[in-house]
Amino acid sequence: MAIEQVMQTRLPIEDLQFLKSHTLFTPPGIFIETARYPILNAGVLASPYPLETLSIYDHPESWRGLGRDAILAMRRHLYSIVIPVNAREMQPKQIIDSLQTIALSVNPVALGVEVEGLPPRHLYSSEGQLPAGPVVKARSLEILSKPEISRVAQKITDKDIPAAEGIWKLFEYDYSLEQITRILAVGLLGMKKNRRMMTIRSAYRIVIDTYINEVIMNLIDQSQIEDFEIYIGKCCNDSFTILASPGESRVDYIRLEKYGPHISRGVSIDDPKLSRDDSRAGNFANFARYSAFRHLLKKQANAHLIIFHHTAISENQIITPWIARAGTHDALSKDPIVIQDLNGAIEILDSILPLGLKTWVHDTPLINRVKKHLVLV
């Protein structure tokens, strides 16, 4: 189906008389979700107001110390303004070019958009991503202000190099996870003949996986930690307990939800030979692993980490990707409890973890993975 047909299907010609022009402001933020491939709903996160703090609304690394309600209030301000695009053919060109310019911008950008109207603000949650305001389909999108384009990012994206190489170069220049994800999602990284747009969710996964693989390669000649370490942290009243053990760098994640009498558990094991994973826990684990491998790179040491994430607040579910990432960072930024043997570490874990260690690890290979390494060495 041609892109013109898709746009006409979603926005009939007879409805054009109801379109209104609005000036909106993006932090910058990009929103891309699947429609029916190769068609994607692609656009921007944008507010009707030129807020002084708008630049942090899609910059989670600036959210540390903020509570859930403050984060949701920010996200509620951001409408998801979308236009159908053909990801394979990278058309319509004017829309693609505008989104790529916005993704490279390091400051908020003013936009002119034609939409039927802006609905009342409420939170729209796309699975595995941070929520934002309602999705609004637009007829056109035009940049009104002059974006401040990052010269470093522009130089890297101009190179005809593999996406993984470009992603790591951006990390080396201290670009944030969100900035790199936006740049990849709009088709600005990779060998030029292969560049395509993709959903934000897919871009996050590729960027995080690339980062982890590069960190593992950077640590290949580094030693392993010698003792057992237990880290404790919190985010939005979710608790995080992390066991660091001697071993190769890998990160397992287990999440226990207890809402009233109901208890559920999700497990993601960092081992392709073990299929014990579910997509929901796997998505949360991806963000937790990003923080964990940042810690290992900074520490310049190899370790096997097990992240125990406990939540008893159902309202936190809507921002769990952020909580998993921020809670892991909070725990690993604290001084650990250091124990010399596994039995002592297990005893302490059992006393710290809500409902006891057995509730968390029964019928999983988590603790045995630690024991197996100790036997091998």
Image (cartoon, rainbow, N blue to C red):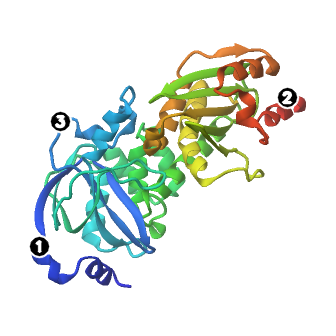
Crowding at label 2, few (<14), some or many (≥20) Cα neighbours within 10 Å? few
Judge from the rendering whether residue 25 lies leftward or rightward of residue 269; answer left or right. Answer: left
C-alpha span from label 1 to label 2: 69 Å
Q: Indicate the quadrant where residue 114 lies.
A: bottom left
The type of residue carrying mark 2 is: Leu
Residue bearing the label numbered 1: 18
Residue type at mark 1: give it: Phe
Q: Which residue type carries mark 3?
A: Glu
Would residue 211 be visible to someone looking at this image? no
Give the label on residue 374, or none. Answer: 2
N-terminal-most mark, 1 or 2: 1
Q: Which mark is residue 52?
A: 3
* Disc 1 secondary structure class: helix
Mark 3 neighbour density, 10 Å: few (under 14) some (14–19) many (20 or more): few
Q: Secondary structure at mark 3?
A: loop
Figure quadrant of residue 270: top right
Q: Residue at x 78, y 16 (%)?
A: 344
Q: CA distance from mark 3 to mark 2?
A: 53 Å
Determine the residue positioned at 65% across, 25% down.
353
The residue lying toward the viewer, choosing from 35 and 349, is 349
The label number, if any, that marks residue 83 in the structure image: none
Relative image position of residue 136 (x, y in whole percent): 26, 62
Q: Residue furthest right?
A: 375
* Rendered location of residue 341, percent (x, y): 81, 18
Q: Is residue 346 left or right of residue 179?
A: right
Image depth: mark 1 or mark 2 in front: 1
Q: Residues within 10 Å of mark 1 (few under 14, many from 20)?
A: few
Which numbered disc, 3 or 2, marks the residue that appears first in the sequence?
Answer: 3
SS assignment at label 2:
helix
The picture quadrant where one finds residue 158 is: bottom left
The tag earlier along the polypeptide, 1 or 3, is 1
